[in-house]
Amino acid sequence: MNRFSLAVSGGIARVTEAALGPYQTAVIRIGFSATWLLFLLRELPHRHELYGPDGPWSWDLAQQLVGSNGSFTVLMWSDGRVWFEIVYALAVLSAALLMLGWRTRTMSVLFMVGVLSLQNRSVFMGDGGDNVLHLMSIYLVFTRCARVWSLDARRAVRQRAARARGERVTDRTGPALWGVLGFVLVAGTLVGRMQGDWLIPALLWTVWVVQALWWLVGRRAGTGEPRIMLDVIANVVHNGALLVIMAEACLIYATAGWYKIQGSRWQDGTAVYYPLHLEYFSPWPALADLLSASGTMVMLVTYGTVLVQVAFPFTLFNRRVKNVLLAVMITEHAVIAVVLGLPFFSLAMIAADAVFLPTGFLRRLGDLAAGARDRLRRGGGGRTPLPGQRTEGSSEATHVGFGA
């Protein structure tokens, strides 16, 4: 019983004292925001046909669907072209800033609003990757995903250094953002635009209020007990969201694998052959013909795909097997991106897989990126770190104020 109590207390301390997986959450933040940003930029010439006023799924049809299923989209606030351009531009901007980790909490909310607004406007334009992005955009709001590899982390390091020198640190950008977004939130609520399902409006209001509370406590209590309590709550919410993200990724692979087992084409080992010869999934016909020329290869890939997807959730109990299978899955998605012409689906799935990557591997990857950046700076005459100085982008920084 004593050992059990120690284990329980140790687990509670681990969950409450720190935001677990800072590198993993940073990777999924960068991965999903980059996927959405690249998609929006690629479809920029076709945005009006996909999600705007020129699309086959008209505004009236979208309004009827949204009214029946209660989904959230700010594109239903107006059918004007100017409003659509504003929403699309904000979706691009929020994705770029979230990827960089600037004011991450606020940008994660705007990123979620952009994803939900565009996808719920034209529900028939998506695929499996869009569904993953749809869910993960909501989960990211609950995570402290800018602890490393972000502009917020770099700013926190600089603020701590300034305080250590006795300098006064003020943050005007955070309160200004909070005030502007609060005005939009209040105005949208008062005019009755926050209709439909209660979940997303409630989440927006909650984040807005919590941001104000975080700022006030940090300003008045500093590092006292109220701030410690807020940190504990934030860590618990982050760790819970991280667990949900991991469970979601496992669920995606498990359900996909078990549904494949029930299909006759997957049972006889020929399922992979058919998409390779569909015009929609054949950007490189010669490459598709080469891969499908061998019946044995097609059979091995078909059965291997099912085996990997069904087995992956069970491999989490063995780190070495999990890492091997994770490399296989990421390679498989990279092949799908090239051979079947589904780059954004593959990027979304690779970003979801990244939550299981080992911390040591991610730290080495970050060190390599930081080294390459420093070499570019030295080559361009930029500032170089002092001997023994750690680069700011790789440090685990505590968020301050509205960047929490």
Image: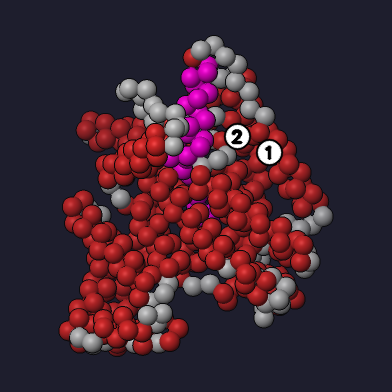
Q: Is residue 161 magenta?
A: yes
Task: Tell me whether circle 1 and circle 2 mark residues in contact (CB < 8 Å).
Answer: yes
Q: Nearer the viewer, residue 363 or 180?
A: 363
Label 1 to label 2: alpha-carbon separation: 8 Å
Residue type at mark 1 is Trp
- Residue 308 vertical placement versus 271 (above, below): above
The residue carrying mark 2 is 402
Residue type at mark 2 is Phe
Q: Residue at x 65, y 75 (%)?
A: 49
As drawn, is 187 to the left or to the right of 343? right
SS category of the residue bearing label 1:
helix
Q: Residue at x 36, y 84 (%)?
A: 285
The residue carrying mark 1 is 178
Q: Residue 389: x percent and y percent? A: 36, 24
As drawn, is 226 to the left or to the right of 321? right
Q: Earlier in the sequence, mark 1 or mark 2?
A: 1
Q: Residue at x 29, y 64 (%)?
A: 331
Q: Residue 204: x percent and y percent? A: 64, 48
Main secondary-structure element of the magenta-colored stretch: helix
Q: Residue at x 60, y 43 (%)?
A: 106
Mark 1 neighbour class, 10 Å CA radius: few under 14, some 14 to 19, many 20 or more = some
Q: In the picture, which quadrant includes the N terminus? A: top left
Q: Which residues are magenta?
A: 137-163
Can I make out residue 178 in this image? yes
In the figure, residue 382 lies in which quadrant? Answer: top left
Q: Residue 343: x percent and y percent? A: 43, 68
